[in-house]
Image: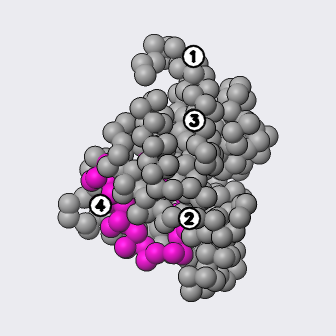
C-alpha cells in the first residue's frame, strides 16, 4: 500500500483469529488468507479456555500458535491481543518473543496486559489475586522484559514494539505512557476518545510524547464500517475480532476503507 497523500491519516487494519471452538487447520487457513489479503496485523488471544459460548469447546495455547503463524505468513505484523502477564516468567516471555520474532523475520509485537480471566488462573494453578496485585506485577515485570531483551544473543530482528492492553485510567494508562509503543482498547468511538485523552494526560505527566504511542482498538465484526469515526477519536489501528467460521469479509471492508482513506 502506497500513501500518495501525505496529509491522509495513517490507518492500519488487522484481524484477531480467536482460537476457540475451532481447529489448528482452520486457523492456519484464516491467517494465511488474511496475510495474502493485505492485513497490517494478525492477532490471537492468550487464554486457556473459551471466553464465550461452550465453556468446554476446543481451545489452543497462544504462543505455540504464534510460532506457526510466524512461519505461515510473510507480510503482517503478529501478536497476542494481549498476553496475560501472570502466565509466564517475564524473562522467559521476552525470550519466547525474541525467538518468534526471528521466525517472523522481525514482524512481532510483544503485547501484554495484567490479566483478568479467572478460570485461566484457577485451572492452571496461578494466583488470581486482585486487579491491584496483577497490575503491580505487570509494573514490576515490564522492566524485567526490557532488560532481558537487551541481554539476549542474538537480539530481536525487528523493533518488536511493546503493546499494553487495558483501559484502567489510574494505573494501566500510566504504564502505557511509561513503557509502551502501542496501546489497545475497545470501542465504541466515545470510549476511545475519552481514554486517548486520559493517556495524553499521563504522557504529559511522565514526559512522554503522546505521538510515540500507536493507539489500536479492537472492534466486533458489525462495527467495521465508517472507521473514520475511530480515526477522529484518536485510534489509528483497527482490529476486527473474528470467531470461527472465520469470515474474512469484515477484514476486507477494513482494507478497502484503509486503501481509500490513504489513496
Instruction: Determine crowd level at label 1: few under 14, some 14-19, many 20+ residues with C-alpha closer than 10 A.
Output: few
Q: Residue sitting at 46 percent across and 56 percent down?
A: 24
The reply to whether discs 4 and 3 touch (Cβ–Cβ < 8 Å) is: no
Mark sitting earlier along the chain (4/1): 4
Please state if 169 lies on the left or on the right of 126 as rendered. right
Disc 3 versus disc 1: distance between alpha carbons? 19 Å
Mark sitting earlier along the chain (3/2): 2
Disc 3 versus disc 2: distance between alpha carbons? 20 Å
Q: Nearer the viewer, residue 217 or 194?
A: 217
The stretch in magenta equals 78-104
Q: Is residue 201 above or below residue 132?
A: above
The reply to whether discs 2 and 1 touch (Cβ–Cβ < 8 Å) is: no
Asked which secondary structure carries label 2, the reply is loop
The label nearer to you, 4 versus 3, is: 3
Name the residue carrying label 1. Answer: 260
The label nearer to you, 2 versus 1, is: 2
Label number found at residue 99: 4
Q: Can residue 46 be seen in this view?
A: yes
Instruction: Determine crowd level at label 4: few under 14, some 14-19, many 20+ residues with C-alpha closer than 10 A.
Output: many
Q: Is the magenta stretch mostly helix, strand or loop?
A: helix
Name the residue carrying label 3. Answer: 248
Label number found at residue 114: none
**Residue 101, position as x, y percentages in the image:** 32, 53
Amino acid at each position: 500500500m502506497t500513501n500518495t497523500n501525505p496529509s491522509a491519516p495513517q490507518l492500519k487494519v488487522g484481524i484477531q483469529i480467536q482460537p476457540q471452538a475451532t481447529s489448528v487447520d482452520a486457523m492456519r487457513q484464516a491467517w494465511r488468507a488474511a496475510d495474502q489479503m493485505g492485513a497490517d496485523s494478525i492477532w490471537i488471544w492468550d487464554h486457556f479456555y473459551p471466553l464465550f459460548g461452550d465453556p468446554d469447546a476446543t481451545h489452543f495455547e497462544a504462543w505455540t500458535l504464534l510460532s506457526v503463524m510466524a512461519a505461515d505468513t510473510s507480510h503482517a505484523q503478529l501478536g497476542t491481543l494481549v498476553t496475560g502477564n501472570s502466565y509466564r516468567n517475564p524473562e522467559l516471555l521476552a525470550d519466547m518473543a525474541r525467538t518468534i520474532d526471528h521466525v517472523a523475520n522481525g514482524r512481532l509485537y510483544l503485547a501484554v496486559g495484567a490479566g483478568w480471566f479467572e478460570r485461566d488462573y484457577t485451572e492452571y494453578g496461578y494466583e488470581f489475586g486482585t486487579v491491584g496485585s496483577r497490575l503491580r506485577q505487570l509494573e514490576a515485570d515490564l522492566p524485567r522484559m526490557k532488560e532481558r531483551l537487551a541481554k539476549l544473543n542474538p537480539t530481536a530482528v525487528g523493533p518488536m514494539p511493546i503493546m499494553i492492553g487495558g483501559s484502567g485510567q489510574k494505573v494501566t494508562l500510566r504504564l502505557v505512557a511509561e513503557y509502551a509503543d502501542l496501546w489497545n482498547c475497545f470501542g465504541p468511538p466515545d470510549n476511545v476518545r475519552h481514554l486517548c485523552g486520559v493517556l495524553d494526560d499521563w504522557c504529559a505527566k511522565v514526559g512522554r510524547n503522546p505521538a510515540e504511542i500507536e493507539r489500536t482498538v479492537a472492534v466486533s465484526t458489525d462495527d467495521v464500517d465508517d472507521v473514520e469515526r475511530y480515526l477522529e477519536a484518536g485510534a489509528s489501528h483497527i482490529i476486527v475480532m473474528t470467531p470461527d467460521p472465520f469470515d474474512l469479509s469484515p477484514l476486507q471492508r477494513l482494507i478497502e476503507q484503509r486503501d481509500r482513506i490513504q489513496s
